[in-house]
Image (cartoon, helix red, strand yellow):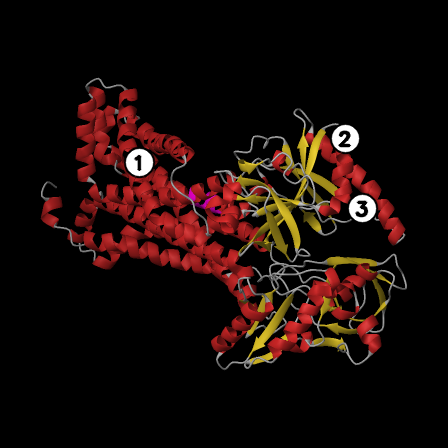
Amino acid sequence: MLKNWLKIAFINYQKNWLSNIINVLGLSVGLCIFLLIFIHWMDEKSYESRNPNKDHIYLVENKNSLGFISTSSYPALSVSKEKFSEIEDFAIANSWDFFKTRLIAGDRSVYTSATWATESYFDFFPMERIAGNLKNAISDDGKIAISEETAKALFGDEYKECIGKIIKADGQNNKDYVVSAVYKFPSSHTVFTPGFVLRNKDIDRNDLQWTNYSYIGYFKIKPGTDVRNLEKKLSEQLNEHEKIAMLKWSGKYDEKDKTEVFLTPISTMKLDAKGLGINKGDKRSIMVLLGLSGLILLLSGINLINLKTAQASQRAKEVGIRKASGSTRGQIITQFLLENLMICLASFIIAFALVEILLPSYNKFLNKEMTLNDPKVFLYSGILLIVFAFISGIIPALYLSNFKPIHTLKGNFARSKHGIWLRNSILTLQLAVSSFFIICSLIIYFQVNYMLNKDLGFKGDQVIQIDFKKTDWQDDYTYKKYLRLKTEISKIHGVEAVTGSINTMANGIANASSVKNALDTTKAVNGVALGGIDYNYFEFYKMKFASGRDLDMRKASDTMFGVVANESFIKKMGWNKNNALGKEVYPGWDSHKKYKILGVLKDFNMNGVDAPVEPILFFNYDRSWAKNNMQNVQIKLSKEDINGTIEKIKEFWTLKAEPGYPFDYEFVDKRFAKTFEKFQKQRTLFTILNSIVLTVALLGLFALSSLLIDQKLKDVAIKKALGADEKMIIWDLTKRFLLICILAVFISFPFGYYAMNEWLKDFAYRIEMPWWPYLLSLVLLLILTFSVVSIKAFKATKVNLVKYLKYE
């Protein structure tokens, strides 16, 4: 029986070779896209999977007036451990990829990332021990634990014998540390990969505030704990202390604006952290792409179902004869499922080959190192194969096995209205999905273009920024370094101007605080960026004033008590650009000192244009504690020989500014362009997916129209014999498909509108929902549908009349 089934299957494959090739290719491409995005999702989900404590360790996050933040105050961590029995222990692991330190051992040095942690760090995040003792590796401030890579860079082949040797941390008051342990990172994905670990000295201070959110903290929770209930208790505790602090500082506490505490499992924080997390992935984009790739897979399945039902008239007599000769319905269903499984299996093999070919380019696009070696990918893919083959095969199998022998053997099947209705419904769904993709692709394209072309409010062309790698607050080291480098770099030929600022373009707001109205301290604006700037900052970036004037560095009152506010701050304070001038405020970073607003600066985008402009107060950097936060120089280059000027700056930097450190710089406009990178990638991926969707849909349409038109060749011959011209015949054969196309496009409109309206909500500056992508999707699909179907329809008009009318 199986042998006969296989023979019948291959005969039918050969008979309908074109439609089967289209099926296999379309399904292979759909599966390839789905597998690539699925591998990306699995890769992101695998972070911290090998940590034995992953089910009991939680990242502590908070939600306040600034939104979700992934940092906490030290008292909120240490006090909670003592107060709540559910908390077994806590750990601090302050680590940021952008913050690195140069370590020196003899004549060797390495520039690597640091983590400032509590002693429990290695209990929370186990590493493989290479040398020393990880148990008490950072038990005091004089010890340092280093990674295997760091140890090799500093001690060469004898790195395993480095325990007890001295390492100097450049920029950390040149302090010496004793190597206490060498560790190796886990083989699996983890965000905890510091080049070295030191004890966080701040934990010994007694003046740390509950409102100082400066620590990345983790709780180890006892098994069986009601995490949601613990979050509630932690939130109540934090609000009690924040209320005390706010009443003490401003005399006002907003009961409606309470801080909430959230506990995020480290096993899911890579994708599910509520704040920025630790190297957080873009879960929303991955899930959207996974859903869209699922739609492509659905389209491929629709092609299978549609073509199988369209071939029903070819198989109707076969089914009738087999039923008449004793075959059961179950046997017929099994046969058709087997045929479908063979097509799906061939498609899966081709899809995996395509994944292997495309994976290097996909890795480069995502800046990852994914490989096709995860057993779960093959397991889930196998399950997907079986489920997909069954679902896409069972509908036509049930449909074909339901034929009645008395009808099929008389040849009445071709007139079945049920078969026509099923094919039309499936084709409508397929074209509706295609229209949805066209609409979304066009709107995404123009939103990203709008962002790229938006006036940012400053001129950053020909400007490079160099961040200091060696900084130190001791003896105003960083402040003096800025002054010296500014003077020296200004002398280099090709440099037009040099400036600096605490918060820099496209780097996010690193420092912010609350600012109160001096006349009414109950009125305050939270999250005001710390705008410490050099005297030429506004002129440097060609920024414009809405009212008032710039800071005058010749006036002591301006340099000591003057500020320039941006429009966003003025609006949040309830003022306008005119009555704000002369108003006085108490900044949170200097709350005992009044500052007078001298000018209102027009808003400019310091971060990406998907976010609103933050309120900022600009002030003279060198008359306050903020001067040691000036950790960069921003250099405007002459248009003549930009590369030559950069080479001169590099020579100066590596020889005199920061010898022993790598030289890195970025053009400010290119750095800002990186804030669009996420959305540009979304646009690129959506455009690729849209192209694949259209290709799969049109291939399916071509195969289906070919089969259906082939079934009407006798009708065409009769019409041609009766004198019908080619245009009329082509129109008769294509008009049904065009009507289906129009219906499908209108069905897609509400889904496209909803999806794009939700997507656009993420942007502070967005286009208005346009109407023309909907019209364009209709016109484009009509043209493509007519073009695809008319090719076969035109060939049908060349039918040989004798061949189809000789028996009539």
Give, as a three-letter code, the residue at label 1: Cys
Q: Position of residue 307 (x, y in %)?
A: 29, 40
Q: Please tell me which of labels 2 and 1 falls first in the chain.
A: 2
Q: Which mark is residue 256?
A: 3
Q: Is residue 691 magenta?
A: no
Q: Position of residue 313 (x, y in %)?
A: 24, 35
| Range covered by the magenta-colored residues | 289-295
Mark 2 residue crowding within 10 angstroms, few (<14) / some (14–19) / many (20+): few
> In this image, 554 relative to 785: left or right?
right
> In this image, 278 relative to 207: left or right?
left
Instruction: Looking at this view, name the residue that lies furthest to the top.
Output: 326
Q: Position of residue 234 (x, y in %)?
A: 76, 36
Q: Please tell me which of labels 1 and 3 falls first in the chain.
A: 3
Q: CA distance from mark 1 to mark 3?
A: 57 Å
Eye-nearest disc, 2 or 3: 2
Taking the spot 48% from the left edge, 77% from the top edge, the residue there is 644
Taking the spot 59% from the left edge, 40% from the top edge, the residue there is 269
Q: Which mark is residue 84?
A: 2
Q: Which mark is residue 517?
A: none
Mark 3 residue crowding within 10 angstroms, few (<14) / some (14–19) / many (20+): few
Q: CA distance from mark 2 to mark 3?
A: 26 Å
**Depth order, front residue of 570/563:** 563
Which quadrant is the C terminus positioned in? top left
> In this image, 478 relative to 340: left or right?
right
Quarter-of-image position of residue 533:
bottom right
Q: CA distance from mark 2 to mark 1?
A: 56 Å
User: Would you place residue 131 above or below residue 679 in this image?
Assistant: above
